[in-house]
Image (tube, rainbow, N blue to C red):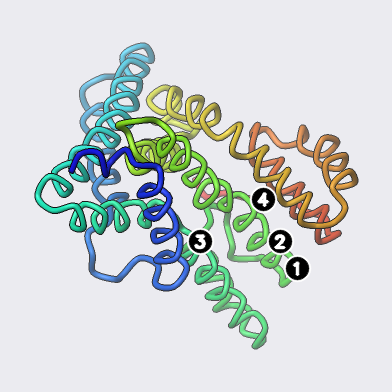
């Protein structure tokens, strides 16, 4: 039974089923999602750390402990759940692995979020579009114009294509190629890093030191998948040299080592200009 866990053919089937499940169904409402569990752990630990430790070095150590613990813990938990399922019944294990891996992909939910904002915008309901956009981005949306809303949607889709789709897929493939590991553990581990970055990876207080490690580590984990995403998009666009040249020129203007590349790729392919001045509450 255990051999099924490390069988490349089975891992390929799980990857295909998980991608199809995310594309066709997405995340079913009402189900407990792994990211929700990760978020609960991060939220409670963060509040505890802020209350207990005030010194920068203390918070950095706490952040390092949180990051390493949650990333490794998520991967180990995923491996154990899949292994237990396979031990009980091979098909049960495959089903569990498929559902867990599908939860790491955000393709359908990303599309749904974009449509949720674009529908009222195309209908001329600017206020409603601003309100819905505020649910998905950190920037202040109160005074955004139609073109600024479109820019925000495209920038969000561009950045999250890597974080929410291609990077988890990359680590799922890497895990599938490692005997005894499988696609789920590494995908969940990356998802933990991404969730940590989105919740505490800020330069502002009280996250400056607490989120320092996770922000840096998530950038490192995303570096290769991001470039592979840009390379793939460039090839699919039919103008790879032009897209890569523009990305190499413009991506360095973004303080993030990855977001600038994703956004530049979409901008180059669609022949639009992204970037500009954004305002954030707090």
At x 34%, y 27%, the residue is 67
Label whose residue precedes the other's in the sequence (4 or 3): 3
Tell me the distance, in whole angstroms, between the alpha carbons under discs 4 and 3: 25 Å
Label whose residue precedes the other's in the sequence (2 or 3): 3
Mark 2 in CB contact with mark 4 (< 8 angstroms)? no
- Between 185 and 280, the residue placed more toward the observer is 185
Tell me the distance, in whole angstroms, between the alpha carbons under discs 1 and 4: 13 Å
- Residue at the disc numbered 4: 278
- Residue at the disc numbered 2: 151
- Residue at the disc numbered 1: 147
At x 67%, y 83%, the residue is 122
Label 2 packing within 10 angstroms: few (<14), some (14-19), many (20+): some
Q: Is residue 38 found left or right of 204 in the rendered image?
A: left
| Helix, strand or loop for disc 2 | helix
Q: Estimate the x, y position of residue 185 in percent, counting from the top left.
A: 32, 38
Q: Estimate the x, y position of residue 50 in percent, counting from the top left.
A: 28, 28
At x 67%, y 50%, the residue is 278
Tell me the distance, in whole angstroms, between the alpha carbons under discs 2 and 3: 19 Å
Label whose residue precedes the other's in the sequence (2 or 4): 2
Label 4 packing within 10 angstroms: few (<14), some (14-19), many (20+): few
Mark 1 in CB contact with mark 4 (< 8 angstroms)? no
| Helix, strand or loop for disc 3 | helix
- Between 252 and 131, the residue placed more toward the observer is 252
Q: Estimate the x, y position of residue 240 in percent, counting from the top left.
A: 84, 47
Tell me the distance, in whole angstroms, between the alpha carbons under discs 1 and 3: 24 Å
Q: Which mark is residue 107?
A: 3
Mark 1 in CB contact with mark 2 (< 8 angstroms)? yes
Label whose residue precedes the other's in the sequence (1 or 3): 3
Which-is-in-front pick, marks 2 and 3?
A: 3
Q: Estimate the x, y position of residue 234 in percent, counting from the top left.
A: 78, 49
């Amino acid at each position: 039974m255990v051999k099924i866990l490390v069988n490349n053919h089975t891992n390929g089937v799980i990857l295909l089923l998980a991608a199809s499940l995310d594309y066709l169904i997405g995340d079913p409402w009402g189900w407990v999602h792994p990211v929700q569990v990760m978020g609960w752990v991060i939220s409670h630990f963060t509040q505890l750390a802020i209350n207990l430790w005030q010194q920068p070095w203390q918070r950095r150590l706490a952040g390092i402990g949180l990051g390493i613990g949650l990333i490794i813990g998520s991967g180990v938990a995923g491996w154990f759940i899949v292994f237990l399922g396979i031990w009980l019944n091979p098909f049960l294990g495959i089903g569990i692995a498929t559902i867990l891996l599908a939860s790491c992909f955000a393709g359908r939910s990303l599309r749904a979020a974009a449509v949720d904002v674009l529908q009222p915008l195309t209908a001329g309901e600017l206020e409603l579009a601003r309100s819905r956009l505020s649910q998905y981005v950190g920037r202040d949306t109160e005074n955004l114009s139609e073109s600024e809303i479109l820019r925000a949607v495209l920038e969000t889709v561009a950045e999250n294509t890597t974080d929410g789709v291609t990077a988890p897929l990359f680590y799922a493939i890497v895990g599938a190629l490692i005997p005894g590991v499988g696609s789920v553990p590494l995908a969940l581990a990356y998802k933990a890093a991404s969730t940590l970055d989105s919740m505490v990876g800020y330069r502002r207080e009280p996250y400056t030191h607490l989120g320092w490690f996770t922000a840096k580590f998530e950038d490192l984990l995303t570096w290769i998948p991001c470039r592979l995403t840009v390379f793939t998009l460039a090839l699919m666009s039919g103008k790879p040299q032009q897209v890569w040249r523009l990305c190499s020129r413009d991506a360095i203007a973004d303080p993030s080592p990855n977001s600038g590349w994703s956004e530049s790729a979409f901008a180059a392919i669609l022949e639009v200009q992204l970037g500009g001045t954004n305002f954030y509450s707090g």
